[in-house]
Image (cartoon, rainbow, N blue to C red):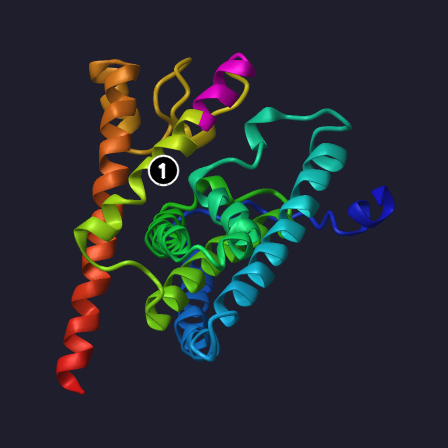
């Protein structure tokens, strides 16, 4: 395995956000996600088992990519030492876990609807935001950089597929049901951050230093870390709501045209 990792450690100059590489990759990636989501949604509408099988496959692809990333970071980047900063439990990691467990809820429609809604709203939100500000995705290795970009394009693809297949729960109430799950993930992230003594920054809400996300970092410096975290989580919830309502509005407009 170490030999394989070494052979795929292709160095690259770290791209700049807003560079031609960044913009072109994201442009073509999002175009592909938009186009392929139509076919994927058609497959998901075939029968009640299809969306669970499709999302399980997506979860396995994400898990395989994450396993490669973790091994690469451990062996090549960190020389056989584990860096908790890269532990896979960010907002954009949660779709991987949900896709893997989703088939367990196939006969529980209410729970499945909640998971579909979370995947639609927060996969799309997290994917778009990370691609818009990709500083954390760019590395001095081609494979790590491509992994980060493709991961978030796949998240956009997942969100669009669920939207086009009509799998998410409708309305503000449907979105509100995802918030306890989001807060559970936040509590788990905080537990990891505390347990590692500040070596991890899961969900960017570590109590040990200011929020590292742009804008909220400045707010954390001005008003303190607890206030910065609270504002960040509030913005996250609002962003999910706007994503949910925006998709519903698009759906209504498309129905009117047809």
Local crowd size for mark 1, using a 10 Å CA cut-off: few (<14), some (14–19), many (≥20): some
- The image shows residue 18, relative to residue 201, as above or below, that is below
Q: Is residue 21 visible?
A: no
Q: Which residue is drawn at 20% across and 49% down?
A: 173
Highlighted range, magenta: 188-197
Q: Residue at x 42, y 20 (%)?
A: 206
Residue 139 shown left or right of residue 105 in the figure = right
Residue identified by numbered label 1:
182
What secondary structure is found at the residue carrying circle 1?
helix
Instruction: Examine the image and state in which quarter residue 42 appears.
Output: bottom left
Residue 148 horizontal/vertical position (percent)? 53, 49
- The image shows residue 219, relative to residue 98, as above or below, that is above
Q: Which residue is drawn at 58% across and 32% down?
A: 87
Q: Does the magenta stretch include residue 230?
A: no
Residue 5 shown left or right of residue 88 in the figure = right
Residue 257 shown left or right of residue 201 in the figure = left
Q: Which residue is drawn at 60% across and 62% down?
A: 57
């Amino acid at each position: 395995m170490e030999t394989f990792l070494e052979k795929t450690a292709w160095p690259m100059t770290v791209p700049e956000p807003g560079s031609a590489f960044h913009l072109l990759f994201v442009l073509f990636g999002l175009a592909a996600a938009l186009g392929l989501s139509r076919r994927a949604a058609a497959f998901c509408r075939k029968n009640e088992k299809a969306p669970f099988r499709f999302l399980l496959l997506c979860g396995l692809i994400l898990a395989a990519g994450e396993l490669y990333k973790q091994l690469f970071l451990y062996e090549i980047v960190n020389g056989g030492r584990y860096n908790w900063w890269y532990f896979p439990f960010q907002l954009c990691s949660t779709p991987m876990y949900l896709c893997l467990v989703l088939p367990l809820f196939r006969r529980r429609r209410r729970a499945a609807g909640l998971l579909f809604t979370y995947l639609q709203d927060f996969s799309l939100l997290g994917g778009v935001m990370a691609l818009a500000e990709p500083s954390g995705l760019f590395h001095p290795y081609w494979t790590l950089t491509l992994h980060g970009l493709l991961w978030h394009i796949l998240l956009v693809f997942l969100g669009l597929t669920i939207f086009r297949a009509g799998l998410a729960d409708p309305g503000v109430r449907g979105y509100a049901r995802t918030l306890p799950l989001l807060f559970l993930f936040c509590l788990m992230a905080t537990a990891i951050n505390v347990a590692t003594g500040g070596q991890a920054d899961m969900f960017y809400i570590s109590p040990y230093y200011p929020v590292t996300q742009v804008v909220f970092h400045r707010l954390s410096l001005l008003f303190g870390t607890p206030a910065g975290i609270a504002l960040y989580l509030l913005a996250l919830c609002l962003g999910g709501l706007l994503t949910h309502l925006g998709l519903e509005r698009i759906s209504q407009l498309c129905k009117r045209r047809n």
